[in-house]
Each structure stands twice: as C-alpha cells, then as structure tokens.
Image (tube, helix red, strand yellow):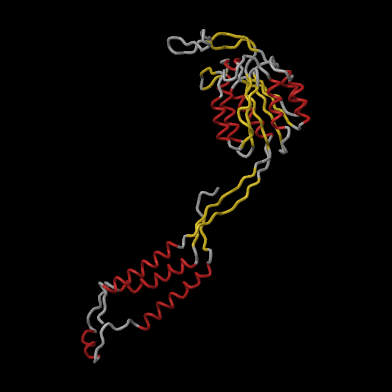
C-alpha cells in the first residue's frame, strides 16, 4: 500500500477559468473604482489629488479575485485518495504440525548462549515462518499421544501466531508420540481442498509409538490426495539433558533459580520420516541446532513460493469544501471591511 496520499481534480476543466482572472483584474483596474462621493466640480477633487494615497487598503482589491480563484478550485472538485490493494491468496495451503510430547522438553538447543528446550526454539522458528507466508492459508495441529487441531487453515495469521505462542508441553495428555495419526489428521484437513499446492510440514523429535495409523500409510493417503509432506526430525539422539521433575511433575530448580537437569535417552525414527517425505514428493530434514532449524524452514519457504494476484485501486474522497469555505470566507471579509475600515460615503 502506498503511504503517500494521492491527489487529483475530478473535474479539471474548470481550472481553465483561472486563465481569465488576470483579464478580470486588468478590466477592473481599467474601469477604476466606483466614486465614493460625487462632486459638482472637478476643481475640488484637484485640490486633493496631490495628496499621497494610503497603501493601507490596496491589498483589499485582491480579495475578490482571490475568492474567485478558490471558488474555481472548488468547482474543479479536488480529491484526496489512498492507494489500496486487494491480495488474492497464492493458492498454497500449509498445515503445520508440532510435536508436544514430553521429549520436547529436552534442553539440547542453545538460544542466546543459554540451553533451552526444543519447543521454545520450534515456536520461535514457526512464528518466523508464518510471518513470511503472508498470502498463504496456514493451519496448526499439535500432537502427543493424540493429534489436536489447534487452528484450521486461515489467512488470519495474527490468530495463528497467538496460538503458536500459547503452545505448552502438557496441554495434550500423554507422553507418547502419534506421528502417523497427526499426519493423517493434517492430510484430512487438506484432501478436499482445491488449492494449487497442499503441504504438510511434519515436525517431531520421537518415534511413532502411539495412535492407530502408521506414518507410511498416512503418507500414501497424502500422495493420493496430492499433499506433499516435508518432514523434520528435531533434536539429538541418545542421552540428552531433561528437566528433573518433582512429585507434582514440575521442573525443579536449585537455590539460584537455575533449572535442574538430568540425562535421559531420546530416540528418533529418521528412516520413517525420510520414507514419508519420499512417498509424497517432499523432503526430509534433520535439525540439531537453532541455525539448522531456521535454515530448514527458509528452504521450504523458498521451495513453495507461488505468485500472488494483487488488485490495485484508489479510494478518493472529495475535498472541495475547503477551497469553497476559503472563498466564502474571503467574500465575507471583503464585505466586513467595506462596512467598517474602508466604508464609502453614500
């Protein structure tokens, strides 16, 4: 959108009358002013002709031509407008999936030099990705032991960003990972749509150890529906730092307020994720640090670009009232001066 206001005259041919104003001024001076006092003899007038004429009221003669000029501007209908643009969706529908199993609590990522859990990093990268896809419909499915639709496909990205911000570990019951069910749920949301491109970005840090649908079968359903799946395996395998929990399931902290960590085993079925991507014509990625994860979403962003239709139009509003008001104000001023400071004798 253009931030600068646009200007035009709706009926500019009236501006040609401005060319007649110098002629009006010249004819008015040629005729001279109407006599304020009639004399029986010009001899009396001759006696005062040598007096120096006051300059105080000379500018008053310019009021009427100036009022006419503003009146002509009003007739030409000045208008101010703002350029608007209507953006049509690019035709790319993307379902994002986010793993919320408790293994996402592993602190094997670094953010500003401090260890952070996987989910914190994933949320930041997801938000950046959503902000870059302004013209696409995006939705979000979170999963642990079961998948849940967090946001349907939408162009209201502020709404989606808020939901991403609100993702928390523990908001979905279970400590297992239903990768196949999550993919199947995402494919089901896309299967009946007529988008130019239908995409699922499947992110997980674990094995498919819950649910009823195998990832391979979900991938075949995706292929049949024309859905491409990009898979991302996030986090390190093996022993990783995890929060030490108290009896209530809350992370424990030391006397200085630092999170207490312990080493737990983390596994990831990379072969299954690679197979899903290959079946659907997508691509498999591996991310073990923040830079790699950002780079993956940047690559997907570049791979799935589509043209956007933009219709430009300008919304104009009339502003003739301003020059008209000035013209009327000048005429009123001239009348007041004629009745007061520059009053003529009858």
**Front-lying residue, 247 or 242:** 247
The location of residue 71, given as percent across then percent down, is 44, 69
**Front-lying residue, 222 or 8:** 222
**Front-lying residue, 27 or 144:** 144
Is the residue 303 above or below the residue 121 in the image? below
Is the residue 338 above or below the residue 2 in the image? below
Residue visible at 47% across and 11% down in the picture:
253
The location of residue 239, given as percent across then percent down, is 61, 10
Q: Quadrant of the C terminus?
A: bottom left
Dividing the picture into quarters, in which one does residue 116 lie? top right
Residue visible at 65% across and 41% down in the picture:
89
Dividing the picture into quarters, in which one does residue 27 lie? bottom left
Question: Image check: 26 left or right of 150?
Answer: left
The location of residue 151, given as percent across then percent down, is 61, 30
- Label tally: 0
Question: Image check: 167 left or right of 44?
Answer: right
Is the residue 186 above or below the residue 133 in the image? above
Is the residue 322 above or below the residue 118 in the image? below
Residue visible at 40% across and 77% down in the picture:
25
Question: Image check: 68 left or right of 105?
Answer: left
The location of residue 54, given as percent across then percent down, is 25, 75
């Amino acid at each position: 959108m253009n931030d600068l206001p646009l200007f035009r005259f709706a009926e500019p041919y009236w501006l040609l009358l401005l060319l007649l104003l110098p002629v009006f001024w010249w004819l008015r001076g040629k005729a001279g002013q109407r006599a304020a006092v009639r004399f029986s003899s010009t001899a009396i007038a001759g006696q005062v002709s040598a007096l120096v004429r006051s300059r105080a009221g000379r500018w008053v003669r310019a009021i009427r031509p100036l009022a006419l000029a503003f009146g002509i501007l009003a007739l030409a209908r000045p208008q101010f407008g703002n350029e608007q643009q209507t953006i049509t969706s690019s035709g790319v529908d993307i379902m994002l999936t986010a793993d919320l199993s408790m293994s996402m609590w592993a602190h094997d990522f670094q953010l500003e030099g401090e260890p952070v859990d996987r989910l914190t990093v994933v949320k930041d990268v997801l938000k950046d990705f959503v902000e870059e896809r302004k013209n696409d419909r995006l939705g979000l499915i979170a999963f642990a032991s079961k998948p849940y639709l967090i946001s349907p496909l939408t162009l209201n990205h502020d709404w989606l960003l808020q939901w991403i911000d609100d993702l928390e570990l523990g908001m979905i019951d279970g400590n297992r990972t239903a990768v196949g069910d999550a993919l199947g749920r995402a494919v089901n949301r896309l299967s009946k749509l007529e988008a130019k491109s239908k995409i699922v970005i499947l992110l997980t840090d674990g094995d498919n150890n819950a649910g009823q649908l195998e990832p391979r079968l979900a991938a075949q359903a995706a292929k049949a529906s024309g859905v491409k799946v990009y898979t991302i395996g996030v986090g390190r395998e093996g022993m990783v730092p995890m929060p030490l929990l108290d009896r209530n399931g809350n992370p424990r902290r030391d006397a200085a307020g630092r999170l207490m960590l312990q080493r737990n085993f983390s596994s990831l079925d990379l072969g299954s994720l690679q197979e899903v991507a290959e079946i659907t014509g997508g691509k498999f990625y591996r991310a073990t640090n923040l830079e790699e994860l950002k780079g993956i979403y940047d690559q997907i962003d570049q791979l799935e670009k589509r043209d956007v239709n933009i219709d430009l139009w300008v919304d104009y509003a009339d502003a003739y009232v301003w020059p008209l008001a000035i013209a009327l104000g000048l005429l009123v001023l001239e009348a007041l001066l004629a009745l007061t400071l520059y009053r003529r004798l009858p």
